[in-house]
Structures are given as structure tokens and as C-alpha cells.
Amino acid sequence: MWDRFIAACSTWLWKQMKDAGAEGYVVGISGGIDSAVAAKLAVMGVGKERVLCVLLPIGREDELAQKVASWLGTEYEVIPLDRPYEVMLDELGCRADKKIALGNLKARLRMASLYFIANELNYLVLGTGNRTELEIGYFTKYGDGGVDVEPLGSTYKSNITGNWGLAKALKVPEEIIARPPSAGLWEGQTDEEEIGFIYQDVDWVLEDRWPDHDPPSPEAMIRVRQMRLGSEHKRHMPPIFEFDWEG
């Protein structure tokens, strides 16, 4: 199954690049499994010379992110964003206890940086979001959700990370596969802790079943459905007021 997926997705990424008149992809590398998988698909689709990995640390540099770039064999840049982040906090007067607002600001700074680089190089910004995250709104609007293409957007998280998953098929290094998923929005943050449930529970609810996994608790079912409904606005362009100018 994964051989067909990899071939089709790689071809799709090449076509998206060519149709846009672009010359490559820029991708933010976090040291996590999704960015590693998405970047590898891009490398297979357009060649490593057309993929630029960018590390955008705020607070500390992630050694695993550099290992991802080395494993891919692409060029990479490290651009610390601590100073612009601190300047924005000073100007905005944000309170340090607003974790969500602070985390979203980091994600949006990274998005703006990736698009600046993409504009310079005539590249597209490669998204790293998977279907699970997109369906429950577990991404920052105009942050990590601000991308040009989403190669993993139809693939559930459990299908990426599992023993027979996409990451294994692409031979992603084991230490990256084993790392607890994290958006790196604050110290010690993990996806599953913030969501409140493991990804397999979330995927079970989204797909109405999940092979080799027991049904999640009723609380998980209710919460995941609420998250999907409450994040609907994130998956669409802003609504436009239509006025009848002829009436």
C-alpha cells in the first residue's frame, strides 16, 4: 500500500510545484515525525536539491531537527526567532501566562519566516499537517496551517506512526519515530497531553473505528467530535459578505 502512496504523493508534489511555476519547497523542520515524513516525500518527488529545510528555534535549538536534515541530505538553515519573538511580546504587552496565545505567536512567526524564504527562492511552503490534526483543528490558524500544500492531509496520524506506518516505509530514523509528538509551543508540551487523548483514540472517533484498537471512552468520543465541530472555521477561507448591489 505505501509503495503506491509514496509514488503517487511524490508525483503530486512535483506537479503542484510545476503548476505553481515554483522551483522547489521550503519546509520547517521540528525534529518530529510529520515534518520528517513530509520532507522525505518532497525529496523523493522533486529531488533533494529543490528542498530547503529550515530550523526555526525559539528558546532552544533541537538536535533532532538537525538529524532530520542530515538524514534527508538536503541543505538546511538555522534561523533563531528568539529576538523577534521577544520584541513582539514587548510591543504587544502580552501576559506570560497566556500559553495558547504565546504558542500561536511562535507558530505565526515561523510561518512568516518560511514564506519570506519561499518568496525569495520562488519555492512553495510545504505543510506537515496530518489528517487527524486537520480534522480536530489541532494547528494554528495562519501559523502551521498557513502552507501551500499538505501532502499528509489525507493520512491519519496512526497511519504515519504505526509499526506498519508510512514513517517505517520511508525508513525514518527510529529515534524520530519514537519521539512523543509535540508542536514545540512551550517547554514540555506534547500533543497528546494537550489534546487529552492518545492519537489512536482520536483516529478511532474520526474514522468511526480503528484496527487493533479498543473503542475510546465516551468522554473521548464527545470531546473529539466537539473539537472537530468547533474548528470548522479553520478549514475554510474566511466567509465573505455578499451584498446584492443590483437590488
Image: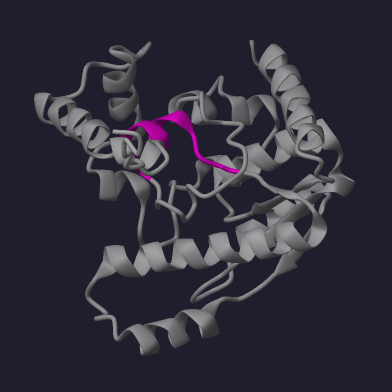
Residue 103 visible to an observer of this rendering: yes
Residue 173 visible to an observer of this rendering: no
Residue 234: % across, % down:
36, 42
Is residue 67 depicted above or below 218 in this figure? Answer: below
Q: Please report the residue visible at 35 percent of the width from the left and 33 percent of the height from the top.
A: 199
Toward which corner of the image does residue 10 lie, by quadrant?
top right
Residue 123: % across, % down:
76, 50
Is residue 36 depicted above or below 152 in this figure? Answer: below
- In front here: 175 or 120? 120
Toward which corner of the image does residue 156 lie, by quadrant?
top left
Left or right of 120 on screen, residue 223:
left
Residue 45: % across, % down:
80, 31
Left or right of 172 on screen, residue 127:
left
Residue 208: % across, % down:
28, 13
Q: Which residues are magenta?
A: 127-138
Q: Please report the residue visible at 44 percent of the width from the left and 60 percent of the height from the top.
A: 184
Determine if the magenta segment contains residue 110.
no
Q: Which residue is outermost to the front? A: 246
- In front here: 247 or 43? 247
- In front here: 66 or 137? 137
Left or right of 5 on screen, residue 97:
left
Q: Please report the residue visible at 51 percent of the width from the left and 24 percent of the height from the top.
A: 155
Quadrant where the N terminus lies?
A: top right
Number of on-image labels: 0
Q: Please report the residue visible at 70 percent of the width from the left and 55 percent of the height from the top.
A: 67
Is residue 57 depicted above or below 206 in this figure? Answer: below
Determine if the magenta segment contains residue 137.
yes
Is residue 55 depicted above or below 222 in this figure? Answer: below
